[in-house]
Image (cartoon, helix red, strand yellow):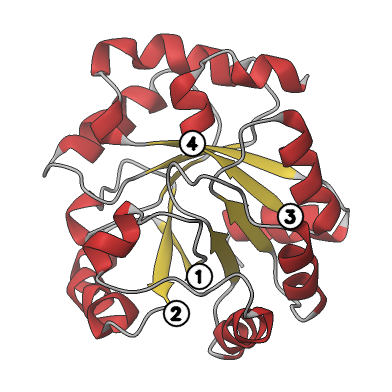
Amino acid sequence: MSKLLQYIINAKKEDKKLLAVLIDPDKIELKNISNVVNKVNRSVVTHIFVGGSEVATGLTELVVNEIKKHTKLPVILFPGDTIQITNKADGLLFLSLISGRNAEYLIGKHVEAASKLSDTKLEVIPTGYILIENGKQTAVERVSETKPLQRNNIDLIIDTAKAGELLGMQLIYLEAGSGATQPIEGSIISKVKQHLNIPLIVGGGIRSKKQLQDAYDAGADLVVIGTAFENDELFFDTLS
């Protein structure tokens, strides 16, 4: 098994909680990356995810290149489209939007990406991506033209996550969406966790140390922070 996924699996077995910062190439200036990444290096962050729903062609590679100059942390692509694929990163979450029914984001984009990925050394990690409603439309919902799962339909959320695992996904990612008004409730996280044998990632709407700890306590193996860090580059200082 490849090292990035194995590290996440081992951390899960050891109950070591992981934390990723999500850097959206469309929301960061290249000249500021060294300063931003140095702050990340001094924090408890274990991974850097790079990606967004709408990113200009070629920008992801420029951002990843610059990030890699300033960190030894693993840099993993979190792509919203095939144009965000670059072999300059260490790995890629091969996201299938299993909460939706748009074939493009279930398999279409993956077919489009296959030839690109065969020519890279990226560690590709199949990931079941589940969008949970958060009170407002997210960029993922708009771009993918899919509807998120309703928070009160926990059985459907559980069944969707389990179906992802049965299909061979190596990770399940519960996502409230960028700029979510509220994070995913601990009750949802814990019930999904009870039915999975693979690591669980949770992201969206987490803006405080307490909300982060609540996600961990509920069973998240890896939590992703994006907007909170975009709004306050000292956010991770509060976690140490």
Tag in front: 4 or 3:
4
- The circle on residue 105 is none
Dot 4 and dot 3 residues touching (CB under 8 Å): no
Amino acid under disc 3: Asp
Residue 110 appearing in the image = yes
Q: Position of residue 48 (x, y in %)?
A: 50, 37
Earlier-in-chain disc, 4 versus 1: 1
Secondary structure of the residue carrying tag 1 is strand
Earlier-in-chain disc, 4 versus 3: 3
Residue 119 appearing in the image = no
Earlier-in-chain disc, 3 versus 1: 1
Earlier-in-chain disc, 3 versus 2: 2
Q: Position of residue 3 (x, y in %)?
A: 61, 55
Dot 3 and dot 1 residues touching (CB under 8 Å): no
- The circle on residue 226 is 4
Look at mark 1 in the image and give the residue it sits on. 130
Look at mark 2 in the image and give the residue it sits on. 98
Earlier-in-chain disc, 1 versus 2: 2
Earlier-in-chain disc, 2 versus 4: 2
